Amino acid sequence: MTADLVHRDATELAELIRTREVSSVEVVRAHLDRIEATDPRVNAVVTLAGGALEAARAADAALAAGEEVGPLHGVPFTAKDSFDTAGVLTQRGSPIFAGRVPDTDATSVARLKRAGAILLAKTNLPEFSYSTESDNLLTGRTNNPWNLDRTPGGSSGGESAAIAAGMSPLGLGSDLAISVRGPAAHTGIAALKPTHGRIPMTGVWPRAPRRDWHVGPMARTVRDLALAYALLSGPDGADGLASVPRTFDAGLGASPDRPVRVGWLTDSGLGPIDPEVAATVRSAAEALHGAGVVVEAADIPALERDNPLDLFYRQHVMEVKPAFREVTAGQEDRMGRISTHMLASPDTSVHDYVQAEQGVERLRDAFAAYFRRYDALLLPVLPVPAHPHGVSRLTVDGRTVPAAHIQTATVPFNLTGLPALSLRFGTSGEGLPIGVQLVAGWHCESTILYVAALLESLSPVRDRHPAL
């Protein structure tokens, strides 16, 4: 069983440890061995936390003594290297922060630890978390475990690659425009971006622009997302945007009294979509219909009126520049290409900034109207399966578009703060994972997790682990 532990999900590992079928030491050691065997090719892990085996021995001793334990007792987890971890390097993908060791844990890290989980390692990211490719001048480039020549995405690409490759069963990522859902789709795992403010951003950097950043769990199964979300959500008294009391437990919910209604789309302002991706979304819609869900083709005209990606860039460049200038002052020669380019980009005029604000308000109104009719929205996560490293342009269904197009289907839900979830439902002709995205109304995580669990049970995917 030990060799197979790296492919079990966190929920099952917790149960195996709790019933003492395996020890926490065995589980942690299996994942450390997996990191040693596979990470030289993938480069997902940037720092081993240290003390994980000692913590596992303490976890086993607590069980032997009959102590009460948490729901993730003895289970290892990893965290993107933008999350502060007490006594463990947190370098944010930049030489400017090389050697930085925080004194305290991020709220989300502390909450998983309180549930009994053991921090195993920190994972790679782009500099300052600001790119869709997990590559930086300090810790290098992460590769996709399904094809090392392809990207695992960003900014939580190290986390997605580690989970997909069996180095970790559960992880913490952050999402500004795509950053947990896109990497999850690239690597065939699952990720949840909850409603804005549901999980505090305390101890995660950068936080600008505050309105768009989200913390989200990443895992191999929807039930792990549900469990992690239940543990992570709720105010912490420090993040003023995390103000909604926790009202969710780890259950995936029961079917409502009326049929669930899901709208689906592959166009409606999303731009070109790879035919294999579009076919996967249609297959997911058909599978839900076959399971008794009311499924209809949907259209959201507001996505065509206001280009969400354009709104995003007009807003966030103005809001993030001051934070970046502050931390890079006098060290501009240690900055990467993306950050350098962003700081050199023209400021948004006040007129354009206000226009962007109004465009986001129109998107919010449009989704409020949509969710009066439907419980969930089904659409692509990404326009293409995982693409080669370092590209500046993509060819999608015969059209050439900027690489930023990869965010078109995800950024609307950062702008509006709606909960969105990515899970795998297909495989490309090249053997790469294809994900679908589910979105629900504000604070309707239970709905999105219910539909996602149903869709996961209907998935045609068989090759769930890359052959590393």
Image: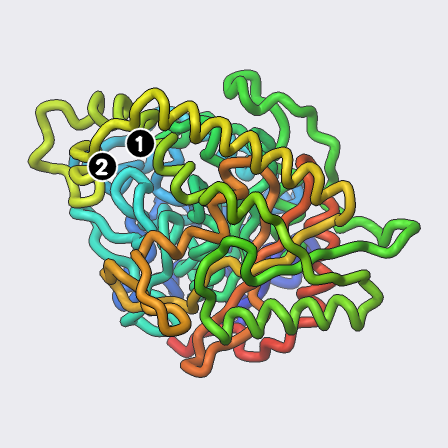
The residue under label 1 is which amino acid type? Val
Give residue 40's quadrant in the image.
Answer: bottom left
Q: Is residue 177 left or right of residue 326?
A: right
Residue 342, which numbered label?
2
Q: Secondary structure at mark 1?
A: helix
Where, quadrant-wise, is the C terminus in this rendering?
bottom left
The residue under label 2 is which amino acid type? Met
Extreme residue in the right direction: 257
Say above or below: 313 vs 191. above
Q: Dot 1: few (<14), some (14–19), or many (≥20) neighbours within 10 Å?
A: some
Q: Which residue is mark 1?
A: 317
Q: Residue at x 20, y 32 (%)?
A: 343
Say above or below: 271 vs 284. above
Q: Is residue 215 left or right of residue 447?
A: left
- Residues at badges 1 and 2 in contact (C-beta under 8 Å)? yes
Say above or below: 307 vs 362. below
Residue 64 seen from this side = no
Nearer to the camera, 448 or 23: 448
Q: Dot 2: few (<14), some (14–19), or many (≥20) neighbours within 10 Å?
A: some
Q: Report how far apart the C-alphas of labels 1 and 2 lie in the structure.
A: 7 Å
- In primary-sequence order, the first of circles 1 and 2 is 1
Q: Residue at x 55, y 39 (%)?
A: 112
Q: Residue at x 43, y 40 (%)?
A: 176
Residue 54: % across, % down: 44, 45
Residue 316: % across, % down: 36, 32
Extreme residue in the bottom direction: 429
Residue 129 seen from this side = yes
Where, quadrant-wise, is the N terminus in this rendering?
bottom right
